[in-house]
Image (tube, grey):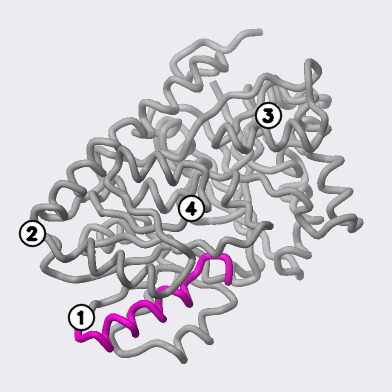
Amino acid sequence: MSFAIVSNGFADGPAQALRDYLVSHGADVVTIFHPLTPEQGTRHHVATYTGGAQVDERTVRLPLRAPSSFVLDPFVPLLPPSVHAWFGFNPLACARGLVARRQRRARRVFLWSVDFVPDRFGRGTLQTRVYDTVDRLCCRRADARIELSEAAREGRNRRHGLAARAADAHIVPMGAWLDRVPTTRPDGFRRRSVVFLGHLVARQGVGTLLDAAALLADRGEEIEVDVIGTGPLEGELRSRATDRVTFHGYVADHREVERLLSDAAVGVAPYARAAETFTRYADPGKLKAYLAAGLPIVLTDVPPNASELASQAGAEVVADDAHALANAISHALASPEEWRARRESALTYARRFDWAMLLEDLLERLAVSPRAKPTR
């Protein structure tokens, strides 16, 4: 079996997990990764893997930065690879696969949606209408589609009026490589370190975290804060932060990200409760990374699985407010026994989301397992 994986963004996510799984099983894989944000520059990466090893890598530099560069993504590379299965991780990537299928360069094409947000580029704008048109086309023409959550599947179905004509939709949540992820130590609470992982934009609530840390310091409860990620607010956030806040920027090696998480005591996800945030329909990868590391989580109720994490994974859901966040962080570190219990709950819950298990099950359902002989 041979595969194409086409996605925007270079951080660890479903596209990278699928690549690692297929490569580890000796499949022939071509990955095409385009920039997702302006901070990721103008380089588009095309890599080829055969027999479990990378055999080629090419970089194409285009004159535009994301999001303006999105219109050029379908032309990198000019000639699409010839594969048995094409996975497009956004509508444009999937549409390119549909063209390849028509050209007999792809036998089956799958749309793997990593988020859903109504009115993506603003209500009634030309960009939103074009996006919806391509997304609806892919949902109807792809051989199958994959969603991260029930909320996303239902939201996209309503948005596009999808019914019987839509491709079969499979739910595959965000996962983690549990066999490789380092976990917090049983006495990890002693470090009094709080970690945030994500894009530095307003909807992620990093400003609220800095305010919460300042409130704790005023109470005499000093904590260390590690911020992993970059984004348009990085300069402003750095100017507000104290010397107890460390900005790590974009960390390309996800194993280093995993190490940083395992050195923390609490993982925070203070999403702003803005109605337009796509997190309401998503299954944020950072939450699975926190769980896999055994971190007690403090989050707002924006993700659709927030209440489940609170009831089953040792998380605490708080209001979108610096005082509430500060109180929850203080509570998480107050009792060693309770911290250990929440750590164990996080690790137990995370076992459901091992990438190896999730991907094996999905590829079997799609009849494109790397172990199977391709159908003619």
**Magenta span: chief secondary structure:** helix
In depth, the one of 358 and 335 nearer the eye is 335
**Rendered view: 173 above or below 13:** above
| Location of the N terminus (image quadrant) | top right
Q: Position of residue 32 (x, y in %)?
A: 62, 46
**Which residue is labeled 3 in the image?**
82
Which of the marked residues, 1 or 3, is nearer the chain's N terminus? 3
Contact, mark 2 vs mark 1 (Cβ under 8 Å)? no
Q: Residues in magenta?
A: 202-220
Three-letter residue code for mark 1: Glu
Tell us which disc is closer to us: 4 or 3: 4
x and y, in percent, of residue 254 in the image = 37, 56
254 in the magenta segment: no
Marks 4 and 3: CB-CB under 8 Å? Answer: no
Dot 4, crowdedness within 10 Å: few (<14), some or many (≥20)? many
Asked if the residue at tag 3 contacts the one at tag 1, i.e. Cβ–Cβ closer than 8 Å, the answer is no
Snapshot quadrant of residue 99: top right
Helix, strand or loop under label 1: loop
Q: Which mark is residue 301?
A: 4
Residue on which the image places disc 1: 221
Image position, residue 68 (x, y; %)? 78, 65
Disc 2 marks a residue whose amino acid type is Asp
As drawn, the label of residue 187 is 2
Tell me which residue sits at (35%, 45%) in the image: 310
Q: CA distance from mark 1 to mark 3?
A: 58 Å
- At horizontal 64% and vertical 24% (from top left) the residue drawn is 169
Pick whichever of labels 4 and 3 is earlier in the sequence.
3
Left or right, residue 305 beside residue 261: right
Amino acid at dot 3: Ser
Q: Is residue 188 left or right of residue 252?
A: left
Viewer-nearest of discs 2 and 1: 1
